[in-house]
Amino acid sequence: MPGTLVFEGKATGTGLQDSGPNDAKKEFPDGVYHFLIEGWQDTLDASASDAKLMTFLEAKGAADVHKAFVGAIKSDGKATLGNRFTGYYTSSKITKMLDDEYTAKYAAKGIIVALSKLTVNPDKFEDRRFLWVELIDADAAGGYVPAQKVEGKSKGGATKKIVGELIEGALDLAF
C-alpha cells in the first residue's frame, strides 16, 4: 500500500520520520507501495492484500506474480526456529527468492522490488524486527532508493548475505 509504515516505537535511519520516542514511521512517495511481512503482529495476509496495493498490481498485470511471491514467503520464507526475538521469517530466504525468481518477474511488469528490514526499539528488551517489501513503480518512482533495503547478490551483497545467514542461524540456535 502507498503511504506510511508506522513502527509504533523508536527507530532511526535514513528516510525515517521520527515524531517522538514511540512514533517513528516511514512515509513512501507516490508510486511506491509496500506490504509488511513482519512487525509487532503477523500482518502478511492483510498487508499483502491491501486494496490500493492490489489495484496497483492489477494495473501492472502483476497480481499473479505477487500472489505467487506471497505464497512462497509463507511456505518457504520462515525461519527455522522463528520466535519473537529474531522474527518468524528470515530475510536471507526471502532475498534468495527475490534473487532467484521474483525480482525478474516483477521487473518484467515494470516494478522494482526490494526487501527492507529495520529493528524497532533496538535499545529495549521489547525490540522487534520489521520486515517489509517495497514495490516501486518504475515509471512513476524509478529514482526512489529504499534506504533499509536488504542487499542480495544483485548488488554485490553475497558476502553480506552469507554473514547475515550465519548471524540469523546463530540467533535461531540461541533462542
Image (cartoon, helix red, strand yellow):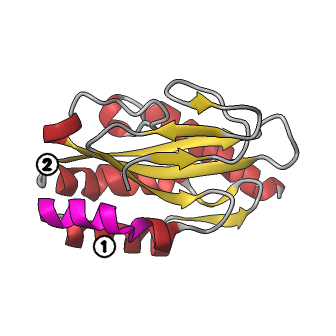
Percent position (x, y) of residue 75? 47, 75
Badge 1 amino acid: Lys
Foreground residue among 26 and 165: 26
At 29% from the left and 40% from the top, the residue drawn is 30
What's the CA distance linking mark 2 and mark 1?
Answer: 17 Å
Q: Which residue is mark 1?
A: 67
Question: Is residue 22 rendered to the left or right of residue 162?
Answer: right
**Does the magenta stretch mainly form a helix, a strand or a loop?**
helix
Quarter where residue 12 is shown: top right
Percent position (x, y) of residue 132? 49, 52
Question: Is residue 137 rendered to the left or right of residue 133?
Answer: left
Badge 2 amino acid: Gly
Percent position (x, y) of residue 120? 70, 42
User: How many C-alpha atoms fall within 10 Å of the one at disc 1: few (<14), some, or many (≥20)?
Assistant: some
Question: Is residue 76 rendered to the left or right of residue 67?
Answer: right
At 27% from the left and 57% from the top, the residue drawn is 102
Q: Earlier in the sequence, mark 2 or mark 1?
A: 1
Rendered-image quadrant of the N terminus: bottom left
Residue 16 vertical placement versus 121 (above, below): above
